[in-house]
Amino acid sequence: MSSETIVTAIFLITAVVAAGILTSQVFPAIYTMSGSVSTSARSADQSLRTDIAIVNSFSLNGTGEAHVWLKNTGSTKMQVPDLEMSSIFVGNPGNIGMVKLNDPAEGWSYEILENQNNGYWDPKETLSITVKSARIPGDYRSTVYFQIVLPDGTKRSEEFTVS
């Protein structure tokens, strides 16, 4: 009887030690994995909540400028410094250049219309972008290709003819 008790006690101690070792090894891995999963979920949530639409675009021959209006149709407001990190591609199909919104030397200007002057591009607000023709590669008197890529990867493009 005492030998069965000793064997049972050894098995019980072994099981407790094995459970402790398993827990000490598995818990950090689960914690690390849950951190990266929550970061990915936050990033995906932000991307799903961010949406924009090109509502109007035109360029008049002889004015030397192209105008594009974008609407924040998502549910997320975007900080102006994040907006200025967006990439803009413009030109003719097959001859496209890239510039940043925040570089006035590039010949770009932008304005948030209906702005509440709160440092954000809020949902339902419109962004007006003006491009000087000197910054449009190729023949800006024909078709103009415009694409904006926000820092989170949301992108919209438009191709329009100069009238």
Image (spheres, grey):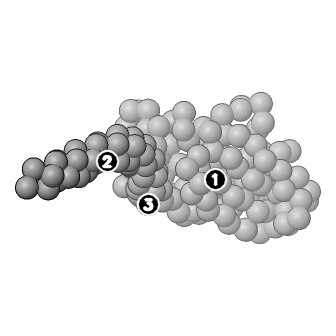
Q: Quadrant of the N terminus?
A: bottom left
Distance, label 1 to label 3, CA atoms, is 15 Å
Label number found at residue 48: 3
Task: Name the residue: 77% across, 69% down.
Answer: 161
Depth check: 146 or 28 in front?
A: 28
Q: Secondary structure at mark 1?
A: strand
Distance, label 2 to label 3, CA atoms, is 44 Å
* Label 2 crowd (10 A; few <14 / some 14-19 / many >=20): few
Label number found at residue 18: 2
Closer to the chain start, of discs 2 and 1, is: 2
Depth check: 140 or 12 in front?
A: 12
Q: Position of residue 12 (x, y in %)?
A: 19, 50
Image quadrant of residue 101?
top right
Task: Name the residue: 14% across, 56% down.
Answer: 4
* Label 1 crowd (10 A; few <14 / some 14-19 / many >=20): some
Residue designated by label 1: 149
Q: Position of residue 9 (x, y in %)?
A: 16, 48
Identity of the amino acid at label 1?
A: Val
Is residue 115 among the parts visible in the rendering? no
CB under 8 Å between callouts 2 and 1? no
Depth check: 149 or 29 in front?
A: 29
